Image: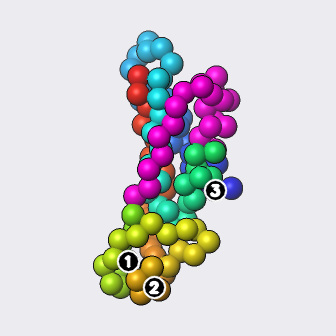
Amino acid sequence: MHEAGAVGRALDAALRAGPPGAEAPRAATIVVTDPAHIAAPAAELHLQVHLAEHGLGDIPIATTVRPVTCVACGVASVPEPAYPFCVACGWPLPKVDGPGVEISLEW
């Protein structure tokens, strides 16, 4: 459930960063920056829930996943959190610095 907290904090920051006096955002983009530890489908689901809590449940969401580069062999891949290992060499993938998700809103 750590996805819920990370998504909630990222959405709150994106809403605060919106233009003063702006209407509701028209679209949201979520980027999973740490796919070895945060599942993209779970992050998107939590974003839908958080948007609905803010009365924004009907805006479209675009989801992307940023690959993680293996420190052992240099291969970039998008792993599943259930198997956070390099697809090429099997080395454990590192935790990416930061919150694990980024959210931007289109106003």
* Residue 70, disc: 1
For label 1, the crowd category at 10 Å Cα-Cα, with few meaning under 14, some 14 to 19 and many 20 or more, is many
Does residue 5 appear in this view?
A: no
Residue named by callout 3: 2
In the foreground, 15 or 76 = 76
**Residue at the location (42% across, 87% down)?**
89
Secondary structure of the residue carrying numbered label 2: loop
Does residue 53 appear in this view?
A: yes
Percent across and percent down for residue 18 are: 42, 25
Q: Are marks 2 and 1 in contact (CB under 8 Å)?
A: yes
Where 19 sits versus 4, above or below? Answer: above
For label 3, the crowd category at 10 Å Cα-Cα, with few meaning under 14, some 14 to 19 and many 20 or more, is few
Color encoding of the figure: rainbow
**Residue at the location (55% across, 68% down)?**
80
Image quarter of the C terminus:
top left
- Type of residue at label 2? Trp
Magenta stretch in the rendered image? 46-66
Where 10 sits versus 41, above or below? Answer: above
Q: Are marks 3 and 1 in contact (CB under 8 Å)?
A: no
- Type of residue at label 3? His
- Nearer-N-terminus badge (3/2): 3
Number of callouts in the render?
Answer: 3
Quadrant of the image occupied by residue 88: bottom left
* Spatial separation of the CA atoms under disc 3 and disc 1: 23 Å
Asked whether residue 96 is drawn in magenta, I would say no
Percent across and percent down for residue 90 are: 47, 86
* Residue 47, disc: none
- Nearer-N-terminus badge (3/1): 3
Percent across and percent down for residue 7 are: 57, 45
Residue named by callout 2: 91
